[in-house]
Amino acid sequence: MAEGYDAQSVERKWQLRWREEGTYQVDNDDPRPPFYALCMYPYPSGPAHQGHVRTYTFGDLIVRHRTMAGHAVLSPMGFDSFGLPAENAAIKTGVHPRPFTDARIAELKASIERLGAMYDWRREVRSHDPEYIRWTQWIFLRLLEAGLAYRRQAPVNWCPGCQTVLANEQVLPDGTCERSGDVVVKRDLEQWFFRITAYADQLLDDLDGLDWPERVKVMQRNWIGRSEGAEFDLPVDGRPDLAVRVFTTRPDTSFGMTYAVLAPEHPLVPDLTTDEQRDEVEAFVARVQTETEVERQSAEGPLEKRGVFTGSSVVNPFTRKPVPVYLADYVLMGYGTGAIMAVPGEDQRDWDFAVAYGLPIIRTVQPPEGWDGEAYTGDGPAINSEWLDGLWKDDAVARAVEWLEEQGLGRRTVNYRLRDWLLSRQRYWGCPIPIVYCPDHGAVPVPDDDLPVLAPDDVEFRPTGESPLKFHEGFLNTTCPICRGPATRETDTMDTFVDSSWYFLRFVDADNHEAPFDPAMAARWLPVDQYIGGIEHAILHLMYARFFTKALSDLGIAPKDLREPFARLFTQGLIRMGGTKMSKSRGNLVAPTRYFDTVGADALRLFHLFVGPPADDFDWTEQTDDVIEGCGRFLARVWRLATGQVAAQPEATDAGPDDDLRRATHRLIARVSDEYERWSYNTAVAACMEFTNQLYKQVQSGVTGPDLDAAVDTLLLLLAPMVPHITAELWERRHGEGSHIHAERWPVADPALAAVQTETM
RNA sequence: GCCCGGAUGGCGGAACGGUAGACGCGGAGGCCUCAAAAGCCUUUGUCCGAAAGGGCGUGCGGGUUCGAAUCCCGCUCCGGGCACCA
């Protein structure tokens, strides 16, 4: 009786062998051309889920394929092991985040190994390792020295119930705290920032050179939000000492400014408020302050309630006429100058406000024939604008800016939506910010020799969620590095996005105790040739990592010419179930383990490759299990074919050398190789299935011999990166003990044989 | 509101201007078996037809082309991102 395909024993055997032999360990002095393949390192939340399986299947396929193509492939893995869930679990159960996290890591690692995904575990990085903390803090201090980290007052999300600050993602869409349900308010606290805005232009411009999905680039461009315009002063009527500076992208429409608006938080508000208006203004400002960010952003109430007149006027420098000054909640202090000139003729929001408050509307751009709308934002000749009349938009903008500069009133400026990165978190389970506060010397950096600053383990987690570091006397009290006098430590920790902004650099030199990494090693491996991860990181993680790479390059820590971390990015689609994203928090996970235990890891991998285009979302339905079983059936067919268990039909006659078979084999090589390059894995699988069906027919009709053997071997080679265990076992059975399919070279198609024969009609 | 995607059999999806529906799932029939499972084979867009064969078909309406799922214009619906950014 011939031996059937036993996925469990085959997979166990090869996983053990690969680990023992260190098959996918790669040294930094490997002579082969380097290739850096990287999957976004995961937050350890327990055993792998289908999203992990999908990512690591793609990643492992790349690693094995590039290795067969002759590259030294750097394939590291680590864990983004700081973060809230571990701390919330600690508050709930009393288990310290460290053992909790270490246990989750062990579970995740075990299931990654059962998938057969190969990594050089010697390079493993964990965010919460003291050595990694040390270098994260070291980098923070270098950024601080360079002026790229700084401290200032900033409004933060404050939960009155928990008496603590919340991260944005802890605030629910309705503006309440995810834990206590209290309404979150804004509070000003001293916070640490990274000056990412210093790189706004580079972050925008360098997107052009990246081989990234266009939609990710678009999201980043929108997030940076560069807009060109002008800033100029509006002198306050009757107050020669005061002026309001405004930003506009449409200086060409300035003759149509019929009022001005300030953000309620604008510092000039008290100066501009007249006594008659003071009560009304103060009531308005107080109300806006108590509003949550969400309420303010989503306010849809009548405009009459969203603004207030200050009593003052400013002079429109273009017309030299005074216009009234209002406050409105929709003008934001954080963008531009916190004050705008209002031009209702060419801005719909200004139009609505003008109508609500009975303010005049003057068109300064001629709308097209038959225009029956309100504000007209399109192009056209300027009107009612004295010396701008007749000029179209671009010329009018240029002329208006020129005039402002000639008159010394203003200048051309560029504004960004991008804000500096607030990195302070009032949390325990994160990388401590290495700063000491001295009564005499202020905020003093912890000296490099004293790094890492580690949070103590003997802390008490409070049900409120307040950071236990604030109450740990041993941690809190220290001495000033400058005067040796008594001082207190910074108790805030860093946003976990700081950890993930440089881990890909640590991987190249993870054992370095003298520096975060050797720039020469970074120069050898980086940029990452293929980065793989979820679309949910399209903005923040990828933007922050790009910023860190540029900053570290400028500081000489990373190679000078390393301006981008990830040359090529692939973002996979998400897995939906019942219409929503499959996730732990939604409780609709389908655990991979049950497939490992039945059809095997190879069949599950094949399913994820076959189900559809890798970039597309897919729905996990009742039909999915059948498809996965179908993938297992295909592998069993391959097994029978490659072990000689397919029988010739009784009436078949033995055939000689087969030219058609050789041609089909080379066409398959050409097709599958191309599909690997194009990430068209679903059709690559289909091609292999089709070929297998053909070979069955050949064998059943009596074909044997070297052409058939070559065809089967080729099929195994092409399948090897997708289904590594079964192909390794079959290869060894066909070629003898000690032969390794994953050490074989990727087959190359003979163009003469692969060419499709065509007839001219 | 603005900016991206997408829409093809019962289902997931193929087809980078040239035979629409590869491959798989599901369905139907057959072989093997005492029987079942597994496996193997055939078949499966839709309508008319016993068959041969023919008509119709890629969200809707136009257009370009010898030829359009594919390119262009105008819609509809679905998904995603950004949303008072001056």
Image (cartoon, coloured by chain):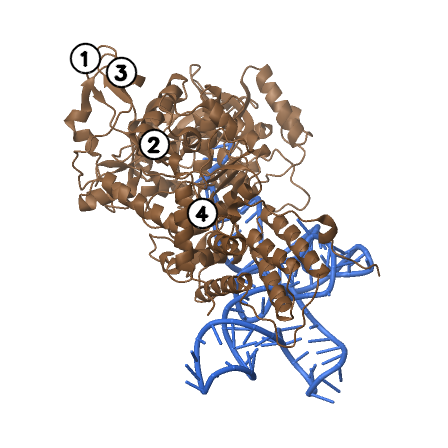
Residue farthest top in this picture? A483
Residue A442 marker: 3
Q: How many marks?
A: 4
Residue A281 marker: 2
Tags 3 and 1 touching, CB below 8 Å: no
Residue A125 marker: none
Q: Is residue A659 above or below residue A52?
A: below
Badge nearest the viewer, 4 or 1 = 4
Query: Label 1: how many residues lie within 10 Å, few (<14), some (14-19) or many (20+)?
Result: few
Measure the alpha-carbon separation of dots 4 and 3. 47 Å
Secondary structure, mark 3, is strand
Instruction: Tell me the colour chain A is drawn in.
Output: brown
**Mark 3 vs mark 1: same chain?**
yes
Q: Where is residue B20 in the image (x, y as percent from the top left)?
A: 68, 65
Measure the alpha-carbon separation of dots 3 and 1. 12 Å
**Mark 2 vs mark 4: same chain?**
yes
Chain holding disc 4: A
Measure the alpha-carbon separation of dots 2 and 4. 58 Å
Between A689 and A192, the one lying in front of the other is A689
Quadrant of residue A757 within the rendered picture: bottom right
Instruction: Tell me the colour chain B is drawn in.
Output: blue
Badge nearest the viewer, 2 or 4 = 4
> Which residue type does callout 4 highlight?
Tyr
Tags 1 and 2 touching, CB below 8 Å: no
Q: Where is residue A182 in the image (x, y as percent from the top left)?
A: 24, 44
**Mark 1, residue position:** A485
Chain holding disc 2: A
> Visible in this render: residue A143?
yes
